[in-house]
Image (cartoon, rainbow, N blue to C red):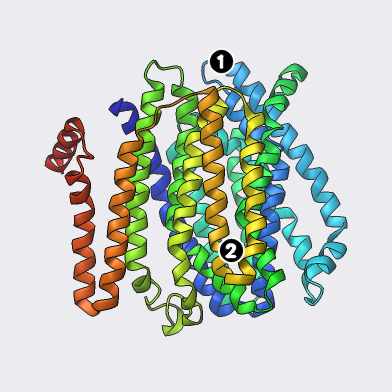
Amino acid sequence: MYSQIKKLGSETLIYGFATVFGRFLNFLLTPMYSNLLVGPEYEFVIYIYTLLAFVNVLYSFGMESSFFRFYTKDNLQQAKKVFTISFYTINVLSLLFTFIFLFSSDFIAESIAPDLISAPELIRLAVFIPLLDALILVPMGYLRMTNQAKKFAAIRFLMIFLTVILNFALLMGFNLQAKGVLLAQLITSFLAVLYILPIIFRHFLKEFDPKLLSRMLKFGLPTLPASLAAIILQVADRPILAELTDSYKEIVTYQVNYRLGIPMMIFVTVFEYAWKPFYLTNYTQPDARNLFARIFTYFTLIAALIFVLITMFIQHIVMIPGIGGKYFINPEYWSGLHIIPIILIAYYFNGVFTNMSAGILIEKKTAYLPLAVGTAAVVNIALNFILIPIMGYTGAAWATLAAYLVSALIIYYVSYQVYPVNYEWSRILKIIVAAGIIFVSDKFASEHFVGIMSFMIKIILLTAFIMILKFMNFFGKEEIELIRKFIKRR
C-alpha cells in the first residue's frame, strides 16, 4: 500500500512543484491587477475569465473524461483511436463555436460591458483563448495517463511563467490594460500549441471508429452538465454579487481575498492531476478500496496543515512589500481577509468531492454526477441571493462553502452505493479537531499578542498541531516508523 501511496505522492509533488511555483508567479498578477488596472478594465477581466471558464467546459463536451476512462496503455492502436476521437470531437466543436462567438462579438460586448468602448475588440481577442486551450486538452491528458508528470508539469509551469512575464511587459511597459491581459494569454496558449504538435501528429489517426465514439459519448456527455454546474458553483457568486451590490469595491475585495485561498486550490488541483490516472490504473488491485481510504486520510491531513498555515500567516503575507513600494495586496482590500478561512474550507470540500467521485468514474456511472454538482450549484445560487443582501460578500463566501459541502455529501452517498469505500472517519475527525483547536488558539493569541511574540506563538502552535494528533493516537505504529526512517534519511 505504502509503495503505491508513495508513487501517487511523488507524482503529486512533481505536479505540485511546478504548479506551486507557477501559481505563485500567477499569484503576482493579483497585486499587479489591483494596482495597475483601472476599475472598469479590471471588472471586465474578472467577468470575461468567468465566461471563458464556461466556454472551456462547453468545448470539452465531456470527451476529456471519456479519454481518461477509455485510454489504455496496453493497446497502442486502441489508445490512438481514443486519442483521435477525443481530439477530433473537441476541436471540431470548439472551432464551430469560435466562429459563432466571433461573429456575435458586438452583441456579446453590448450585453456584458456596454460602457466599455474597447469591449468588442476585447471580445474578439478573448474568443481565441478557449480555442487554443482546446487544442492542447487531449495531448495534456495523454501526458497524465502515460505518467509523464514531469513533462506535463514543465509545460504548465512555462505557460504560467510566460503569461506572467507578458502581463508585466504589456501592462507595466505598454499600459495596455485588459487588452494586455488577453494578449498575454493568447501568445502563451499559441506557443503551447506549437510545442505540443508532435504529440498530436504521433497519435492522430486518419481512421475513425463510430462505435467507439458512441461509447465515449455515452460516458462523457453526462459529465458535461456536471462540469457546467461545477463552473456555476465556482463563479456564480461574482455576477450575483455584482447584481445585488452597487459597490465595485465589494466585488473586487471579494475577488482579491477569494484568490488568497489559492494554496488550498493548488493542492486540490495538483492532487487531481495525479489522482485520476492513479485510481483508473489501480482500481483492479485487491486492496484498492483500502488504499483509496488511506489516501483520503492523508489528503485531509495535508489540507489541514495548509489551512492552519494560511490562516496563521495571511495577515503577514498581505503586508509584504510589492510593486513600487506598495504592499503585496492593496490595503484597500484587507477588510476581506476574514473570508479566507471560509474559502479554504470550501476548497477542501471540493477536494473531498474529487476523492470520492473516483467510484463514479470507475463504475462508469457518470449519470450521477449532474445530480451532485447540479444540486450544489442550485444551493450556491439560492444562498447567494439569500445571504448577500444580509452579509455582503461574506455571504457569498458562506454560500460557496455550503455548496461544496453539499456536493461532497451527495457524491459520498452516491459513490458508496456503486463503489463502497470504508473511509477512516475516526482519524479524519481527529485531524479536524486538531486543526480547529489550533485555529481558535491562534485567533485568541492574535488578539492579545503582537510582533515577535505573536510570531513565536504561531510557530509553537504549528508544532502543537502534530503533538495533538499524536496525543489522540492518530498515527499508527507503521506510520511512526516510516516517519522516523524518513527523518533519519534526511
Q: Circle 1 — which element? A: loop
From the top left corner, tell me how far across and down residue 202 is, in percent.
61, 28
Residue 201 shows up from this direction: no
Q: Nearer the viewer, mark 1 or mark 2?
A: 2
Q: Left of 27 or right of it: where is 219?
A: right
Residue 396 circle label: 2
List x then y, in percent, for residue 296.
39, 36
Say above or below: 281 vs 48.
above
User: What is the quadrant of the C terminus in the image?
Assistant: top left
Label number found at residue 75: 1
| In this view, 370 is above or below 290 | below
Query: Which of the 4 quarters of the picture holds residue 372?
Result: top right
Looking at the rendering, which quadrant does residue 414 occupy?
Answer: top right
Residue depicted at 31% across the width and 25% down the height: 1
Could you tell me residue 323's position as x and y percent?
45, 79
Check disc 2 and give the amino acid type: Ala
Residue at 54% over, 62% down: 397
Which residue is at a point 50% across and 68% down the rendered structure image? 257
Amino acid type of disc 1?
Asn
